[in-house]
Amino acid sequence: MNKILLVDDHPLLREGLGRLIATEKGLSVCGMAGSVQEALSMVESEKPDLVITDLTLPGRNGLELIKDMVATHPEIPIIVLSMHDELIYAERVLRAGGRGYVMKDSSPDRLLEAIKVVLGGGVFASKTVTTHFLRALSSTKGPPSPGFPLERLTDREMEVFELIGQARSNQDIASRLGISPRTLDAHRAHIREKLGLGDGNELTRYAIRWVEVGIIGG
């Protein structure tokens, strides 16, 4: 019996996923966590065979969970189940050490397929993501595709960008990420430079627009 740990800050979603997984022969849910800290604690106590996590979590995010897991428990594979745009985030997940990426609006069968593939030692992603990822790996010159400007941002800069898009204050963002206001200002400056934005107000408008149309939020 393969044990799965579910990590999501929405209890109803966790329960729904748990019921879905319980219907599949050979799979069981060994625990449910709502944060990175809680997930890491349950990994130690429950010893899951697979972790399924969202990216958006309170405090530290799913990418940080993946990096911690790769450092401490590289034998436990991780699948990300998220509403975040796969062309922006799936590559980051795979580079961080994740083994699968599934959109939350996918069919239940697709998630079950991803679970089987990853438990079998494979990597699961859509054909679009796979093609995009392989092109990025084989590219030896030129900047990221101008069609996806957020690819230019680091993982930390993406965190800052998303929080700006949620209309959070600088103080709130710095507190959530555990960084100083000066470091946050540096991140904002780098984001503006990489995205070709003129000032802080333009950055805020741009980030909010991305979140509102659903490209990031979820």
Image (cartoon, rainbow, N blue to C red):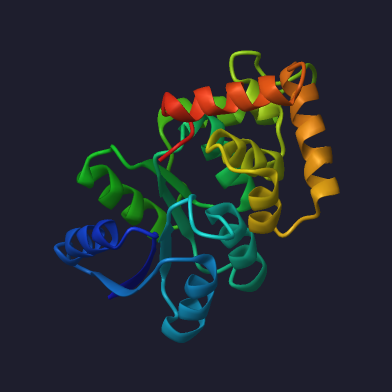
- Report which quarter residue 178 is drawn in: bottom right
Which x, y percent locates residue 203? 67, 24
Q: Is residue 6 visible?
A: yes
Q: Residue furthest bottom?
A: 45
Q: Quick one: quadrant of the C terminus?
A: top left
Residue drawn at x 65%, y 13% as measured from the top left: 146
Q: Quick one: quadrant of the N terminus?
A: bottom left
Q: Is residue 120 left or right of residue 56?
A: left
Residue drawn at x 58%, y 31% as measured from the top left: 133
- Report which quarter residue 136 is drawn in: top right
Q: Nearer the viewer, residue 43 or 128?
A: 43
Q: Residue furthest top?
A: 146
Q: Is residue 18 left or right of residue 76?
A: left
Which x, y percent locates residue 48? 41, 74
Compared with residue 174, is residue 204 higher up or lower down, i.e. above or below?
Answer: above
Q: Nearer the viewer, residue 61 or 125?
A: 61
